[in-house]
Each structure stands twice: as structure tokens, then as C-alpha cells.
Image: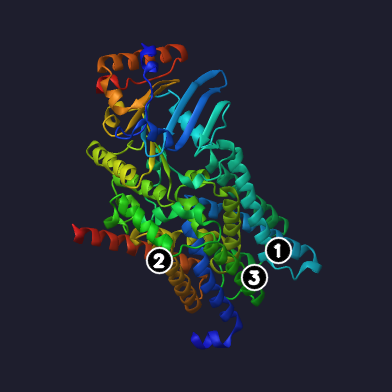
Amino acid sequence: MIAGILQYEFLQNAFLTGIIIGIIAPLIGVFIVVRRLSLIADALSHVTLAGIAASLLLEKKFIGLSGLNPLYMGMVFSVTGSLFIEKLRAVYKHYQELAIPIILSGGIGLGAIFISLADGFNTDLFSYLFGSVSAVSRADLWTILVISIFVIAMILLLYKELFLLSFDEEHAKASGIAAKSIHFIFIVMVALVIAASMRIVGILLVSSLMTLPVAASIRIAKGFKQTIFYSVLFGETSVLGGLMLSYYLDLAPGGMIVIIAVLILILTILIKKLTVKVAV
Amino acid sequence: MILIFEAVVMKITAGFLGDKMEKQLHSIIEIEQVSYRYEKEDVLENINLTIHEGAFLGIVGPNGSGKSTLLKLVLGLLKTQNGEIRLFGQEISRFKDWHKIGFVSQKANSFNTGFPATVYEVVSSGLTKKLGLFKFMKREHHMKVTQAIDSVGLLAFKDRNIGELSGGQQQRVFIARALVSDPKLMILDEPTVGVDAQNVQSFYEMLDELNKKLGITLLLVTHDIGTISDKVTHVACLNKHLHFHGKTEEFEQLKMDEMSEFYGHDVHILTHEHDHHHHHHGGSEQ
């Protein structure tokens, strides 16, 4: 496999992208989980699907657009979807979780229309749904790299504010922090990370890479920084392990990655149980 | 009855200071003829209250007595309709030094207890606003955080997740979070809600130390008249009007049966006028 990575550009692309999203997806995932927004990732990934389908449809109908990278359209849809979620959460102040099913079903609905308008697609769509080792282009890699540098920089710079906003939103507002703007930046980052990650894990499994490593990490970590550390460690392990296995077994990487993440989660729960028993 | 209480002259500051010294102490909060009404309902009427530096004032009053409204006015979360509020000698609309005021809300108890953050991390978050955007903690800030944790007696717990602590300890963490930005005044809204009875005593002892050793002026709001009367230096009874404001000793001297009668009686009037659901406080606890 190492030889393969050195030899083939597509494998380099897949692994480098994998390493990047193994960091940023769980990193932003920690903030999503502790703010109890896990389902937002699901809603946005389905909106991203609509964007991909729209892009593939345009590509099929208009020969002139054949060079269009579905990643960009996916991103546009995802970010737009995140803004709609915020708008809906403001409209339904007392039923904020309503925004999620509205956007999620809206995304699938649009996606279904675009797909049937195109009379179905080739295997391309399958790779978007469940990820692919071979489909990541150099252009994708660069786009994803730029996104992750932006996301990591923002999280470093806004760490204090994001922490306070996650821990105690009311106190954050009372102490005069620009809570609205920071939340806005945060939700746009979530949308970008989802669009960036779907190449490897696939749209249907993107949210699991943001939540499963965090769920495992919370079981064993002391403190917030340690939670972030373990989340990234588990996420990275899942992505690299999943990519390697799927390369050898010729399977969709998304499935392998998620199954490894689930196994890690089960392990941490067992370890926690054992250590608690020993302590007693 | 009410006249008797309003007739009690307010005398502030510790007894050993002479009258001339008293006048030189800075007033931290000055509330002058403040009234407030929501829609058709008067919540506060003609409140006059001055809190001097170093005082530990307890404001007691039943539910619906306007305590929270008064706090919100002082914290600038509500705008004054009538009257004037000055903080540290400055008119509240022009007041900028909000970092001088630490606020510990009752809601601190209802945070997500599963949140994976250590005591140290939570207390550090109290510096967020003071540090400002894009700034990181330096060594002096880390020292401040350690000091604040120490002064609430939780140094041994600094690396524990906050969810592992008891309700009383968690409330201390929130006090430390407020302390870390060096407040001159700390405002506490029902801080012992969710703290078990055994730990309430030591919680007040800690507040007493903050007040005496660090010289932080404290303003505490509670509906529970029984627990605070021997801890605070001054008491104010609020029920739409301010019925009594003075030193705790004077407050203690009031015949308790009269006190409870007044308290219960007035609660009753409120119930009658506004059809409030209420609980009896004060009287039975004396």
C-alpha cells in the first residue's frame, strides 16, 4: 500500500484528504456535540446532497459545464442550508429543533428532484453517498486543504469564545460577547467541513465522523482540551484504518470508517465500565 | 405596620467606624427613586437604596416581589424607566467598566452537567471578555485562575470535570469564574438554589471571606430570609416597595412575630391584587 501511495496520485489524494478531514471533522464535531446540535450535521449533509445532484444534473444537461466540480455546488448548498437553519431557529424560538427536519427533508426532496430530472446518474452518485478512495482529485485536495486551514485557524482564534458559547450561552451573552456573530461563523464552518468531508466518507456518513469520535472521547476524557485531543485521535484512526481496509477489500471507505469509529466507541464504553468497576 | 419599617433609618458600614468616616466610603450602587412597570403592572415603586464599598447586602423578598427586575436594572439588562441608578458613581447608561461587576446567576445550576470541561477550564472562561478577541491567556492569567479556584476552596478539584462535583461545589466554581476578572462588586441571584442544606452554611462562610478578606462588595438576592440574616452586614426587604434597609443587627432587633406578620400580610396583598401564585416565606422559618 505504501508503494501504491507513492506510485498513484489518486491514492495520495485520498490519503492526504483523509488525514485532513480526520482532524477537522471531529474538531468541529466536539463543539457540535456539546452544544447538542448533532442533528444539524445530518440536515446539512442532506442539503449538500441536493447541491451535488444539482451540479451533476447541470453537467449532464449542459455540455459546457462538464468541468464543474460538484464539491463547489455542494458547499454553496450546505452554507445556504446553514443560514436557513439559523433563520428557522429564530422563527421557531420555542421549537428550535424543528429547523433540522425541515432542512433535512427539504434537502432530500430537492436532491430527489434533481436526480430524477437527470434520469439517474452513473456510479458517480454512489461515491458521493458513501465516499470513495479513487474519486478525490488534486483540485478537491487543494480546496479541502484551504477550508481546513481556515477552520483550524478560526477555532484557534475563537477558542475562548466558542468554549464559553458552548458551555453557557446565556453567560456568554450576558458578558457581552458577540455571541451571534460567533455562532454564525461557527455554523458556516460546520457547513464547509461537511462539504469537505463528503468526498471521503460520503454524504450519508459525514455526520458520524463528526459525532462518533466525540461520543467515544467524552466517555474517557478529562476536560475540554482532552476531549478535543481524543476526538481527533479517534477520528484519524477511523479514517486511516477505514481507507486502508477499503482499499484492500475494495469497499466504500465511508462504511469502513464509520464501523471502525463505532468499534472505538464500544471499546471506550467497555474500558470506562471496567475502570469504574476496578475503582469501586 | 409598614410605616414602622420605613421609619428605620438606614445606617451603613461597620459599627467601629465613626460617623465622619462613613461619609468617605465610596458608594458602589446608588438607586434613587427607581420605579418599574411591565405593561400594566407595577413591579417596583420608588426604590431608594445605596450600597457602600465593603458591604454584604442581602435583598430578601417573596417570589414576584421585583427582586429579579431590580437586579436586571442594576446589571443594565433592563433600562430604567423612572429614577436613576449609578454604579461606582457613574450614571448607568454611561457606565463602561462592567468587568468590575461579577454576576452569578441562579441558572448556573442548570447548565449541562455532562459537559466535558474541568473546573480550571470553566473558571478560565471567566476571562473571555476581559482578554478580548484573538487574545490568549498568559502566565499572569493562569495565576489568576489558580488564585480564584483557591479562594473558593476547590484547588484540589481543579482538574476534575465539573459534572463530577456536587451542586454546592459547582456553584463555587461559578463564583470563581466571576472572581477571576477581579470584580469589585459581586451580584448573586439565589445562589444556594440546588445546594444541599449541609453545604449552604459553608457556602455563606466562603462568601463572608470574599467580603472580608478580598474586600469584595456583595449583593445577594434570595427569597429565603432565614438563612441569610446572620451572614450579611445589611438587609433590604423588597416587596414592590423597599420596606426595610439597614444593618443586620437592627433587622434582628425587630420583633420576629411582627416581621413575619408583615411579611405574610404583604405577600397576601400582592396575591390579592395580582392573582399571583405564591409561597409563604420568612414567617415560618423564623
> Label 1 belongs to which residue?
A56
Measuring from the top left, give residue B95's x and y in whole percent: 56, 41
> Label 3 belongs to which residue?
A143
Seen at 50% across and 68% down, the residue is: A23
Residue B113 seen in the figure: no
Is the residue B34 above or below the residue B24 in the image?
above
Left-right relation of B157 to A42 = left
Q: Quadrant location of the C terminus of chain A?
A: bottom left
Disc 2 residue type (three-letter): Tyr
Left-right relation of B129 to A146 = left
Residue B178 - label: none
Seen at 33% across and 45% down, the residue is: B210
| Labels 1 and 3: the sequence-earlier one | 1
Disc 3 residue type (three-letter): Thr
Left-right relation of B156 to B174 = left
Residue A230 - label: 2
Disc 1 residue type (three-letter): Leu
Q: Mark 1–mark 3 contact, CB under 8 Å? A: no
Q: For residue A146, which quarter of the picture?
A: bottom right
Q: Chain of mark 3?
A: A
| Labels 2 and 1: the sequence-earlier one | 1
